[in-house]
Amino acid sequence: MDADIREALQYCPNLPSMSDVAMGIVELGRETEVNTSGLAALLSRDPAVASRMLRVSNSPLYAQRRRSRNLQQAVSVIGLNGALTLALTFSLADSLRQAPGSARTIDYVWRRALVSAAASRELGAMLGRRDLEELFLAGLLQDIGILALEAALPERYGKLLVVPPAHDHLLELEAETLGCDHGEAGAWLMRYWCLPEYLPLAAQGSHDPLGMDVADSERFQLHCVAVAGRVADLFLGVDHGADAAMLADRASRWLALERGEVEALLDRLPSGFPELERLFETRIISHRRAAGVVDQAREVLAMRSLQLLDHAGEQHRRSAELERNTRLWRETASRDPLTGIHNRRYLDERLETEFARAREHGWPLVIGFLDLDYFKVVNDRYGHPVGDSVLMHIAGLLTRHLRDGDCVARYGGEEFVVMLPGADREAAEAVFERLRTALAEEVYTGEDGRTFHVTASIGVVAYSGDDSVLSTAALVRAADRALYRAKEHGRNQITFGELDD
């Protein structure tokens, strides 16, 4: 971007501007210690942003255990970092809507921004990312340079937008007329606003992410936002066939997505448009038109897939196979090979996550160790194949008796661990008594026709969500001591441990 354009942007009095609340959020994000009450107090100065935050916290996006009744609870449910990003999203969205410029341009940028944002977030969710709010905001702002250039260069740039061209054609016109594109202008504006660096990087690389020299940690976000822009072109453009083919090509090159994954993205995305329209008070696309776009795209992708079967190179096949194997390995690495339930590795990671969440929000958390009584006798008397069959059956029984969101894992040998996020001691007593009874009543048959039962000793510890416990290791030690006492006092019983014993 040459000096004349930078100067025009720098001294333009009509540039889109940030609100005081948005600037406050940016400043708050730079502080090393931020608390929920401080953010809630800042957001309360903008009723529109505050009401959206409350609505989002109670939406299906966050499967919270308790309904948020006020702004501070909403921030706690969403999480501090996520809440900062979402609040900035809502505040900047209002800046986009109120930017100077023609109504046609603002409508074009705004609708493409919302679809890009939704697609970027959905892609992140599909690929297991945790920075979903950041992806949404980066997708939302990738075209803000169009508004900046129209405000700073109304005569030169306004001519390009008399009839809004297709996005790729707009890029060509920008290169011919200005020698730069709106991604660069948007990056300049966001740095001028002192926004976090991942946002200008995403805008600058949204059209050619492979040409950007960035750290590996930043590369996914760049590619995700760039693919999301192609998704927006598909839903909002005119030539859906060409846009679908372009999307499939870019999704494969930039994110290694296969045809089925692209179709899954397109199938899921329209279901979120109504909520998005309510949150941002706008109209994106009708349900009927969105369904038609998806159907046509599916046909194009199927035809393209058939054509590629004859021409795909060995390297591409190996790359796709490696990607699939990596995903399979990640899933396999978290599962116990005999029972199919989660293993100790997964449990350790999940326990750290749930413990941190419980401490932050003051939520209860319960873990229980279940050790099968005299299980060595089962293996010695009936054989290891029967013992293995019993372990698999018990794993299924435990899973069936737990809620969605609870966790059961094989800790090793004949020992299992059950974790109940959000459950207090009273609820835990009922759950573990139900499990103990179900285990004791189950009847097994050996190869010789003899029947037998298997009971379990259970040690449980209930954490109330306060600051008295500093680590998951303390929870595990307390539950293990309780298990030992259950065995010592006769087995086939439940013993609760105390965290301070």
Image: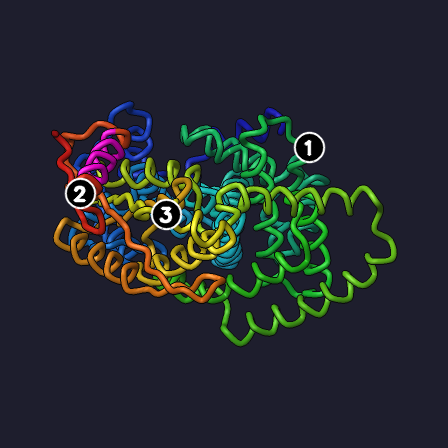
Can residue 371 be found in the magenta stretch? Answer: no
What's the residue type where badge 3 is placed? Phe
| Relative depth, front residue between 45 and 274 | 274
Residue at horizontal 44 percent and vertical 51 percent from the top: 341
Q: Residues within 10 Å of mark 2 (few under 14, many from 20)?
A: many
Precedes in sequence: disc 2 or disc 3: 3
Q: Would residue 231 be found to the left or right of residue 125 on screen?
A: right
Precedes in sequence: disc 1 or disc 2: 1
Dot 1: what SS? helix
Residue 441 pos. (x, y %): 28, 64
Q: Name the chief secondary structure element in magenta.
A: helix
| Relative depth, front residue between 268 and 235 | 268
Dot 2: what SS? strand
The magenta span reads 474-486
Q: Residues within 10 Å of mark 3 (few under 14, many from 20)?
A: some
Q: Would residue 476 be found to the left or right of residue 142 on screen?
A: left
Marks 2,3: beta carbons within 8 A: no
Precedes in sequence: disc 3 or disc 1: 1
Q: Label 1 vs label 2: CA separation? A: 53 Å
Which of the 4 image quadrants contains residue 445?
A: bottom left
Q: Which mark is residue 403?
A: none
Q: Is residue 438 visible?
A: yes
Which quadrant is home to the C terminus? top left
The residue at which mark 3 appears reads as 375
Residue at horizontal 49 percent and vertical 32 percent from the top: 198
What's the residue type where badge 2 is placed? Ala
Q: Is residue 81 above or below residue 58?
A: above
Q: Is residue 110 visible?
A: no
Residue 354 pos. (x, y %): 30, 41
